[in-house]
Image: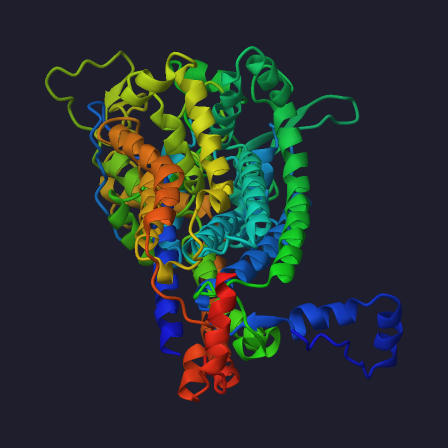
Amino acid sequence: MSSHSAPTFKNPMVRWIDSRLPVFSYMHAEYGTFPMPKNLNYFWNFGALAMVVLVVMILTGIMLAMQYTAHIDYAFDSVERIMRDVNYGWLLRYVHMNGASMFFIVVYIHMFRGMYYGSYKQPRELLWLLGVVILVLMMGTAFMGYVLPWGQMSFWGATVITNLFSAIPIVGDSIVVWLWGGFSVDNPTLNRFFALHYLLPFVILGVVILHVIALHVTKSNNPDGIDVRGPQDTVPFHPYFTAKDSVGLGVFLMVFAFFVFFAPNYMGHPDNYIPADPLVTPAHIVPEWYFLGFYAILRSFTDDWWFFAWFMSWIMDAKLAGVLAMFGAIVVLALLPWLDTSKVRSCRYRPIQKWVIILFAVNFVVLSWVGGQAAEEPYVSIAQWSTLLYFFLLLVVVPVVGWIERPRPLPSSISEPVLKAGGGGMAGATAAKMEKS
Amino acid sequence: MRIGFKSFSLTVAAAAIAGAVGLSGFAKPADAAGKAVYPPEMEWSWTGPFGTFDRAAAQRGLQVYTQACAACHALSQMFYRNLTDLGYTEEQVKEFAAQFEVQDGPDEFGEMFFRPALPSDRFVSPFPNEQAARAANGGAYPPDLSLIVKNRALGFGSIGENFLAMLQIRGFSSGADYLHALLAEGYVDPPEGVELLPGQWYNTYMAGNAIAMPPPLYPDGVEYEDGTRATLSQQAYDVATFLAWAAEPRLEERKETGVKVLIFLALFTGILIAVKRRTWADVKKH
């Protein structure tokens, strides 16, 4: 950490710029000598991967926007023209389309890593909150992007999701008309969604920069979840993590490329290759796969569900309850740093919490699965129990486990076993005392 | 290093699970009773990592489309010039296009006029608009066939079957299976107790089983230029191949590029792994 002294650059041009605007010193400090815990595993690749996907999405998106026409009569055909006649248009579009799915896969794993190793805990609460903000922005961006090709699922997905706002008492219907810019999803809706879809990624980029700044203040958490004690616990970002992130990037790009070149429509819905038709409702309206978990929560709230009937039906209707639960699912995630009452970060040393987090992840997969099924038994019941479990785990189990769990003893420092092997027990003992304070 | 690999495999497993979630979006074909009917799976030349469109089948398919489908179904995303990709010469394409009349104009007198189509024209649609199409077809609207193979690709059944098909790079072939089955095998006598409205036919593979399209193909209904016997199944197979090409004419270029990209990435990732090991060789993580 003390190795932050400004380097002297050989190139006079670089020196000239750096003494006036220290971009080179900054890069050197933040991506050169920046101290990284040396015990990070490959789960720590996913932040960098998310950054790469964001840049890929922005670049392909800008190039697609040059060929796309945001008008209900031309949008579908302009996308097909990109697929057929624009040079490498098929590549740009498939990268962009699958990039959205990849972004969510990467971010979901990134979040799981944060939950498993307690990266959201003190002092990284704000870092976690900024991450949740990024997730919400991503969801908005992805939703509006899916509307742009103006296929059947674009149109009907937009109709269903924007209609959710009509659940808001009194002003709901006015809000929906305001969102649409008319009395149904129509050309004004498509136009504003395109404008916002172009805008939001740059907002995401801004929040990502804040996320990274906050990260560079608190520094990375690590699989042991203990604080860095000194230089013996860290390695400089370059070359160690440039090398390690590159390995993850290589593997990730192979997965990404496989989907782009060999299964580009696997994660999409075939109905979106039918031009939007306001008079023909698809048999099953489903959102993109990465929303299915939240969609399942939304759909769980039906008039005949006992939970809704007992606890909520006397204040609100089922639709409003579903909408609140769906947004609540994200709010609860944002509150995680305060819901978790344990002092220990990493699930490596938390024998109960470990299974709580794994169960939470499995439950989310189950929710995503039932969210894609027709609204019929047994899927409705599974979705309802999974919805309860989602909130029960975060709101009840996590705080209680924090109180009752007996964590396993923490290592006194990241490099402790190494020091022990070398016979130096002193540093470890002092560090253990510091951990308590 | 050991821990590194363990967590690495964990990460890959997590990524695989997340990817598998993507399957759940598939819609399901269903008959009137709500149970799924999946068409028989055929062998298609354009599946797999090196798949290419069978040009002979696609050319025969163009003939089937022109003679049996084009009277009602548009193919509006296609241009006549695209046909050179199927192995026709520019002369042949010009000649083919010239059979059709397109409206053009206005001319210098402000009048619209008809002229023979050029290779730069889109395939001429049989009806000027949806209303005209419905009026001519008893209220039913014959869908545009440009993307029919892609937008009828409803998968192969369960999440597991779809996942395996994805790994086998079968792409949107379930759409072609559907098309083949609908045309060649779907038209059967309705089962006891099924009432059809006038102008409807029973088809096993149509969603809801009632289809407004009369059986469009019959054995030897087309006389193939290359002498192939025009069985019902052959015609359905050929037209499905042609329409699969029409749905994604850049498929071959995509797969060809993909093979190169993946070979490059595999080699490059190998180098990156070596670099990483070398870099970390002197670091004891524990």
Residue A387 x %, y %: 34, 33
Q: Is residue A210 left or right of residue A429?
A: right
Residue at 32% of width from left, 43% of height from top? A363
- Residue B151 shows up from this direction: no
Residue A17 falls left or right of residue A428: right
- Name the foreground residue: B81 vs B247: B247
How far from the left and from the top, in percent, is residue B9?
Answer: 35, 67
Q: Is residue A17 above or below residue A352?
A: below
Residue B129 shown left or right of residue A199 in the figure: left
In this rendering, would A23 be left or right of A68? right
Judge by depth and name the residue closer to the eye, B164 or A24: A24
Residue A103: % across, % down: 51, 51
Is residue A36 visible in the rendered structure shown here? yes
Residue at 46% x, 86% y is: A424
Nearer to me, A429 or B21: A429
What percent of the width, then of the height, locates residue B246? 45, 44
In depth, the one of B189 and B161 nearer the eye is B161
Question: Which of the colour schemes (rainbow, by chain, secondary structure, one colour) is used?
Answer: rainbow
Does residue A11 sit above or below A288 in this rendering?
Answer: below
The answer to which quarter of the image holds residue A21 is bottom right
Instruction: Say which quadrant the N terminus of chain A sits in.
Output: bottom right
- Count of numbered tags: 0
Residue at 47 percent across and 26 percent down: it is A324
